[in-house]
Amino acid sequence: MKVALVAAEMAPYAKAGGLADVIGALPAALAECGARVSVVIPGYRCALAALRTATVGGEYRVRVGNQDERFRLRSGIGPGGVAVFLIEHDGYFGRDGIYGEGGRDYPDSIARYVFFGRAAAQVLADFIRPGVVHSHDWHSAVLPIVMRADPQLHERFAGTASLFTIHNVAFQGLCDAAQFALLNIDPAYFSIDYLEFYGQINLMKGAVVMADAASTVSPTYAREISSDPAFGFGLEGVLRAKGPRFVGILNGADYSEWNPATDHRIAARFGPGDTAGKAVCAAALRERAGFDPKSRRALIGMVSRMTAQKGFDLLAAALDDLMELEVDLIVLGSGEPQFERRLRAAERTWPRRVRLSTAFDNDLAHQIQAGCDMFLMPSRFEPCGLTQMYALKYGTAPIVRATGGLADTVVEFDPSSESGNGFVFNRYERGEMIGAIGRALDIFGRPRAWKRLMANCFAADFSWSAAASRYMELYRQLRADRTR
Ligand code: ADP
Ligand code: GLC
């Protein structure tokens, strides 16, 4: 089985969030299942600097709107020995950022990713020739669209199955109808059955409709976005119409990157059998944060894009309540300025108990996972969420809202049966969140129970192999349908 994954991010070469982690780990897991895997990503400046590559073939050319765009193809070897192909185009991708700079998206993001989809289609048709094309999120939505809507590509991909995975339905690649010309497909596709969405173009909708199947990254999120307008952002009906061809497959965690027993970004190694190292990590983190080293308070961490999706409005509203409890708080993340301001103010009020870092700092992300007692994710919605899985691996109890992948991975700890691996609240309300933190602190104050909870955290296993087998099964089904 020859599979090509196409996406806008891939760890460790180009990362803005969890999509990168998935594309960095899933290919190797698929290869373990016997697939021959290639990955196609944009040749951003950071990616070309991070991966040793060689140019493949000569100059390629695709049409975007009325422009001939020339690009080069570079290839290198990625994690697990998979082939990584980068689309090198100086104008679109030779920039300092991935999606933007200084907190602002690049103004030509639609053109950039229309180009990317077109270029990927060309490279796949001419060079890689996969049996399955698996594209991810709106940035690679143009690929499954042109595979079927462009007459030439339609023929060349006749036997090729396509799967489109949604990592976040809040970002759909919406743009003005005037941009339709960029796609160079029949205007008939600007209709309600395809790309048209309340007068605009919706690339994600087009991909869901035109790919052979669609999926998302957890079973609960699959249910939420196909049934509830508060989650589906207008795509509920389209997803429902896909019927059994829309599924939720829970992501995995990459334990070669996130494992306290082997992690060299943290102060000491530890694991289920030996937790002494965790105390060393906690002390190092407290010192780095400038916290009182002798504090007996619980240390709560967050590593997250700072947006309303992630529950930062709830956190902002609950900071005073939180500080009345016996906790210290360390947050790594950047995003919406109002949340940064609120946390900066809290830092000034409680300099020895609250710390915010707005860097993108993978070392600190690991140190927070390792050094904290609890990991907070009060998300409004969460397609999967990877950081709660990482927290579990580091014996750090997740406190989460029961939504999307959080509901599929975290179970409330029950001190009487000693089952469960974290703390879960349901309604998106300050009081509910504070309640869950209160329950966590109650257990934290009972060392025997807390030890049991930590053991349950360590025991959780979300390795990629389970997800990879499910994708393989789906690929086989889609291939069979195509070649029948
Ligand atoms: P999302 O993709 O919605 O941002 P996930 O939980 O799936 O959420 O993945 C987030 C990934 O990004 C994790 O690997 C996390 O460690 C990383 N991350 C988020 N913010 C930062 C940051 N400021 N610095 C370093 N890593 C970060
Ligand atoms: C998105 C989602 C996150 C998910 C990640 C990887 O960024 O917000 O929940 O874990 O994609 O699938």
Image (tube, rainbow, N blue to C red):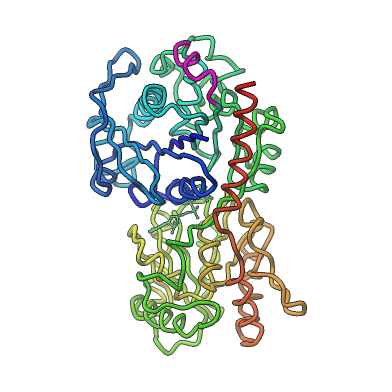
Observer-nearest residue: 434 or 385?
385
Residue 288 found in image quarter = bottom left
Residue at the location (65% across, 40% down)? Answer: 225
Note whether 73 is above or below 279 in the view shown.
above
Q: Position of residue 331 (x, y in %)?
A: 43, 66
Displayed quadrant of residue 429: bottom right
Q: Which residues are magenta?
A: 151-160
Residue at point 61% right, 77% down? 455
Residue in view at x 52 percent, y 44 percent: 34
Give the image quadrant in which the ligand numbered 1 is located: bottom left
The image shows residue 44 at horizontal and vertical percentages of 29, 40
Q: Is residue 195 magenta?
A: no
Q: Nearer the viewer, residue 406 or 22?
A: 22
- In this picture, is 332 found above or below 144? below
Image coordinates of residue 285 in percent, x first then y, are: 38, 77
Quadrant position of residue 139 = top left
Q: Is residue 369 left or right of residue 273?
A: left
Q: Is residue 154 magenta?
A: yes
Most frequent secondary structure within the magenta stretch: helix
Q: Nearer the viewer, residue 57 or 337?
A: 57
Please name whichever residue, 266 or 336, is drawn nearer the observer in this view of the structure: 266
Q: Name the spot of residue 109 as percent of width and height, x first.
A: 36, 31
Where, quadrant-wise, is the C terminus in this rendering?
top right
